[in-house]
Image (cartoon, rainbow, N blue to C red):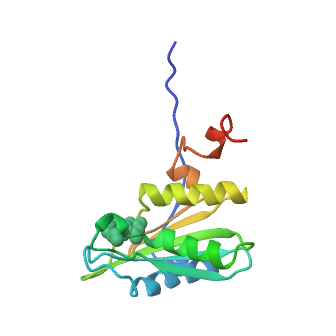
Amino acid sequence: MPKTRNISFSYTEYTSADEMAPSDRELVVSSREIAMNAYAPYSNFKVGSAVRLQSGRVVTGTNVENAAFPSGICAERTALSNAISNFPGDRPVAIAVSAVTPSGPTGDQVSPCGLCRQFIAEEELRNGKKIRIILSGKDKILVIDSISDLLPLQFNKDDLRTVLP
Ligand code: THU
């Protein structure tokens, strides 16, 4: 008999960064500040991301677009790549993302694209520790415990176990 199963998750919603714990608030502020540096002439959607490492260090990144559109990269992958490349032993514990449009910061939260979710999932699995995801907007900030919540039934290295040495 087929079974219907359910996947659900809980998250915390804030209406202002002022309500957050200081270290998460700082991450939101860093992602908002770095968004101004984005190179986004094609979408005008400037995104900033800030990664908190286990040591407490914060590493940031922005989206970087390209005339050959698919060559562009999102802020989350820039920030995480920056962290992984420069501080290899220092594991990410949280990542914040914010966006600014020509009319100002977005009111609603920004959600990571599928590629970024997959990228964060690889890092979370590698660390064996959850990475807190902070999706920030001017009027709404969502805090999610783990990328598994945003990418259920994910494909990862466990799926490759039969073919890997
Ligand atoms: N973008 C990000 O950098 N992060 C997201 O979470 C959503 C989308 C970028 C990609 C592209 O440069 C622009 O925003 C519009 O899609």
Q: Which residue lies furthest to the front in this view?
A: 165
Residue 25 in picture, x, y percent from top left? 56, 80
Q: Which of 77 and 130 is in front in this view?
A: 77
Relative horizontal placement of residue 102, taking residue 32 as reference (left or right): left
Residue 108 can be seen, yes or no: no
Marks counted in the figure total 0
Residue drawn at the location 67% of the way across and 82% of the way down: 57
Single out the residue that lies furthest toward the top.
Answer: 1
Query: Residue 120 is drawn in which quadrant?
Result: bottom right
Residue 99: give x, y in percent of width and height: 38, 76
Quadrant assignment for ligand 1: bottom left
Q: Position of residue 1 (x, y in %)?
A: 52, 12
Residue 110 higher or lower than 126, as above or below:
below
Q: Taking the image as drawn, is residue 27 in sight?
A: yes
Residue 4, position as x, y percentages in the image: 49, 25
Between 19 and 60, the one nearer to me in the picture: 60
